[in-house]
Amino acid sequence: MPKGGKRGSHKGRMRTYTSPEEIDAQMKEEKERKKQEQEEGDFEGAAQNDTAAAKLPGSGSEDSDDDSAERRRAGVEGLIEIDNPNRVAQKSKKVTQIEIEEPRQLSRREREEIEKQKAKERYMKMHLAGKTDQAKADLARLAIIRKQREEAARKKEEEKKAKEAAAAAARGVNSLSLK
């Protein structure tokens, strides 16, 4: 028998995806539901509205139970404040409370990144000045290449002059033989 029993595993099943239209429709329904809850919460007779909404035809029992429980909680939460010591509340600072002049402490990664950038800049300055080993090697290689190119150009020039002289000599011989 395969692993997982008769049903098999979930890996061979086809995946189903929610279409964007369905997602949009769900979002609209949630917004409408929240608007209705807010409007009903504004009235003083919120309890009467809860019972009326539960009795409406076509409303699912699950939806009405969830809505009424949320409404009750929302009404009670507004009246009673519960202080949970384990819950950490996000404290937002006002603009006047933020001290701009206080230097911000950099994290280790940020400091290392800044040091790395400064070291790279120093190296590039020294490299351009020709003070690094790599720059010296590059300059020596360039000098050798320049010498080789000059010698090659000189040889080409000499060969060209030799060909011209040979051609001129050949023309001179041809001109003498024609006379």
Image (tube, rainbow, N blue to C red):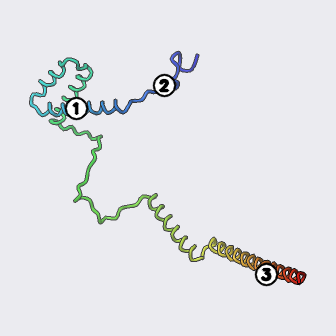
The image quadrant that residue 89 belongs to is top left
Sequence-first disc among 2 and 3: 2
Amino acid, disc 1 = Glu
Give the farthest residue toward the right: 177
Q: Secondary structure at mark 3?
A: helix
Q: Name the one closer to the observer, 32 or 172.
A: 172
Q: Secondary structure at mark 1?
A: helix
Q: Is residue 96 left or right of residue 17?
A: left
Q: Which mark is residue 136?
A: none
Q: In which quadrant is the N terminus drawn? A: top right
Look at discs 1 and 3 and give the one toward the viewer: 3
Look at discs 2 and 3 and give the one toward the viewer: 3
Q: Is residue 79 above or below residue 155?
A: above
Sequence-first disc among 2 and 1: 2
Q: Which mark is residue 32?
A: 1
Q: Is residue 87 left or right of residue 127?
A: left
Q: Name the one closer to the observer, 138 or 77.
A: 138
Amino acid, disc 3 = Lys
Q: In this figure, which residue is indicated by the disc labeled 3?
A: 161
The image quadrant that residue 63 belongs to is top left
For the residues bearing labels 2 and 3, Cβ distance under 8 angstroms: no
Q: Residue at x 18, y 31 (%)?
A: 36
Q: Is residue 17 above or below residue 111?
A: above
Q: In which quadrant is the C terminus drawn? A: bottom right
Question: Residue 153, how many percent across, how many down?
Answer: 73, 77
Instruction: State how far apart marks 2 and 1 are (Cα).
Output: 33 Å
Q: In this figure, which residue is indicated by the disc labeled 2?
A: 14
Question: Residue 165, how many percent across, how many down?
Answer: 82, 82
Question: Residue 78, how many percent across, how many down?
Answer: 16, 36
Q: Residue at x 21, y 37 (%)?
A: 82
